[in-house]
C-alpha cells in the first residue's frame, strides 16, 4: 500500500511543479513560496483538526521537535530554491533535476541512518545522478 501513497505523492509533486511555474510568473519567488506555505499550513492543520490528530502534539519528544524543526528549515529552503529555479528554468528540467534529491537521500541515509545500500539501490541512484548530469549539460 505504501507505493500507492508514493505514486500519489509523485502525481501531486508533478502538479505542484506545473501550477507553481504558472504561479511564479512575474512575481517575487520568496513571496510565492510564502503564499504556498500558508496554503499548505491551512490545509494540513485543517486535516489534523478534522481527523482529531492534534492530541498527538502532547506526546512529542524533544528529539521529535528538534528534528521536525530542522526538517522544516530544510523544506523551506528547498521550496525557496525550487521556486527560483522554476521561475528561471524550464519546469521539465527543474523538476527532473530536483529529483536528484532521491539519490542524495539514498547516500545520506546510508551514511547517517546506516541503511543498507543494495546493488539495485546504488544502480538506481547512479542512474538518477547520470540523468541529472544529462539535464544540466548543454
Image: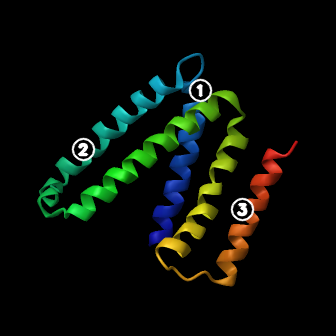
Q: Are discs 2 and 1 less than 8 Å apart at CB?
A: no
For disc 2, the neighbor class at 10 Å (few under 14, some 14 to 19, many from 20) is few
Label 3, secondary structure: give it.
helix
Q: Earlier in the sequence, mark 2 or mark 1?
A: 1
How far apart are the two marked residues, 2 and 1, measured between alpha carbons?
Answer: 26 Å
How far apart are the two marked residues, 3 and 1, measured between alpha carbons?
Answer: 26 Å
Instruction: Name the residue rendered at 50%, 62% in the picture.
Output: 6
For disc 1, the neighbor class at 10 Å (few under 14, some 14 to 19, many from 20) is few
Q: Is residue 102 left or right of residue 37?
A: right
Q: Earlier in the sequence, mark 2 or mark 3?
A: 2
What is the x, y in percent for residue 67? Answer: 33, 58
How far apart are the two marked residues, 2 and 3, measured between alpha carbons?
Answer: 34 Å
Colouring:
rainbow
Q: Quadrant of the C terminus?
A: top right
**Residue tagged by mark 1?**
22
* Closest to the observer, 28 or 51: 28
Is the residue 31 above or below the residue 44 in the image?
Answer: above
What is the x, y in percent for residue 125? Answer: 68, 68
**Residue tagged by mark 2?**
45
Is the residue 67 above or below the residue 89 in the image?
Answer: below
The label shown at residue 128 is 3
Label 2, secondary structure: give it.
helix
Q: Earlier in the sequence, mark 3 or mark 1?
A: 1
* Closest to the observer, 10 or 73: 73
Instruction: Name the residue rendered at 58%, 69% in the picture.
Output: 106
User: Which quadrant holds residue 40?
Assistant: top left
Instruction: Name the residue rendered at 28%, 37% in the picture.
Output: 42
Which is more foreground, mark 3 or mark 1?
Answer: 3
Instruction: Name the residue rendered at 37%, 48% in the picture.
Output: 72
Amino acid at each position: 500500500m505504501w507505493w500507492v501513497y508514493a505514486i500519489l505523492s509523485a502525481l501531486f509533486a508533478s502538479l505542484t511543479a506545473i501550477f507553481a511555474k504558472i504561479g511564479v510568473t512575474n512575481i517575487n519567488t520568496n513571496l510565492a513560496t510564502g503564499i504556498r506555505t500558508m496554503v499548505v499550513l491551512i490545509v494540513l492543520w485543517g486535516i489534523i483538526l478534522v481527523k482529531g490528530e492534534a492530541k498527538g502534539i502532547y506526546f512529542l519528544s524533544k528529539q521529535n521537535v528538534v528534528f521536525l524543526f530542522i526538517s522544516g528549515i530544510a523544506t523551506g529552503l528547498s521550496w525557496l530554491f525550487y521556486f527560483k529555479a522554476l521561475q528561471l528554468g524550464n519546469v521539465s528540467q527543474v523538476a527532473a533535476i530536483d529529483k536528484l534529491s532521491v539519490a542524495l537521500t539514498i547516500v545520506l541515509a546510508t551514511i547517517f541512518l546506516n541503511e543498507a545500500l543494495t546493488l539495485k539501490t546504488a544502480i538506481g541512484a547512479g542512474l538518477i545522478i547520470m540523468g541529472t548530469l544529462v539535464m544540466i549539460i548543454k
